[in-house]
């Protein structure tokens, strides 16, 4: 089976064309040499894949006939990636900022709720008289007449 089809069939890439692009960019290799999309995969090959700034290593146990379900993937490949690579991935995910930088668009509903909770403002319960809210009193309105 071709390596681009193999990586797609074991669900390492979402589409076969994405797998072929990654192979063209020399992010996939068997052993120490970079491969082309037409390279045939054999049982026992160790494939090195650079994805998300992590170097994955997978060992081919069995070649699937076509694309397989996620639960069947462990029957066809064995993950031999170093544990340090997964730790790096975990650290990178933790270090990413969830929130946008200041000035980059309007807040989401979640952001608005968190801001209201932090400030402690609940306008609907604090202000029942809108004249008081806008600072007008009965004395101010009588003076204007």
Image (cartoon, helix red, strand yellow):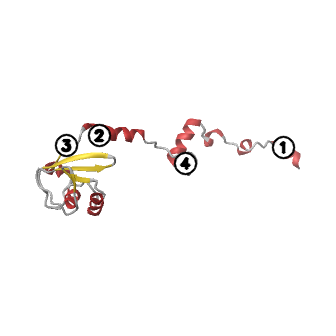
- Please state, as top left, top right, bottom left or bottom right, where the N terminus lies in the image: bottom left
Q: Nearer the viewer, residue 122 or 74?
A: 74
Contact check, label 1 and label 2, Cβ < 8 Å: no
Furthest-front residue in view?
33
Q: Which residue is mark 2?
A: 86
- Compare marks 4 and 2 and give the one earlier in the sequence: 2
Q: CA distance from mark 4 to mark 1?
A: 37 Å
Q: Which residue is mark 1?
A: 140
Q: Position of residue 24 (x, y in %)?
A: 28, 60
Q: Position of residue 145 (x, y in %)?
A: 89, 50
Q: Quadrant of residue 79?
A: top left
Which residue is drawn at the image coordinates 53% and 43% (left, top)? 113
Label 2: element kind:
helix
- Compare marks 2 and 3 and give the one earlier in the sequence: 3
Q: CA distance from mark 3 to mark 4?
A: 43 Å
Q: Nearer the viewer, residue 89 or 11?
A: 89
Q: CA distance from mark 1 to mark 3?
A: 78 Å
């Amino acid at each position: 089976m071709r390596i681009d089809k193999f990586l797609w069939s074991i669900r390492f890439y979402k589409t076969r064309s994405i797998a072929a692009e990654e192979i063209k960019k020399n992010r996939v290799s068997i052993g120490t040499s970079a491969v082309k999309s037409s390279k045939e995969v054999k049982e026992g090959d160790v494939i090195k894949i650079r994805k998300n700034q992590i170097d994955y290593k997978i060992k081919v146990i069995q070649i699937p006939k076509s694309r397989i379900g996620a639960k069947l993937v462990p029957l066809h490949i064995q993950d031999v990636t170093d544990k340090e690579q997964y730790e790096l991935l975990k650290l990178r995910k933790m270090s990413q900022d969830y929130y946008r930088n200041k000035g980059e668009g309007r807040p989401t509903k979640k952001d608005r709720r968190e801001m209201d909770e932090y400030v402690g403002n609940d306008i609907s319960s604090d202000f029942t008289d809108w004249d008081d809210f806008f600072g007008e009193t009965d004395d101010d309105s009588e003076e204007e007449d």
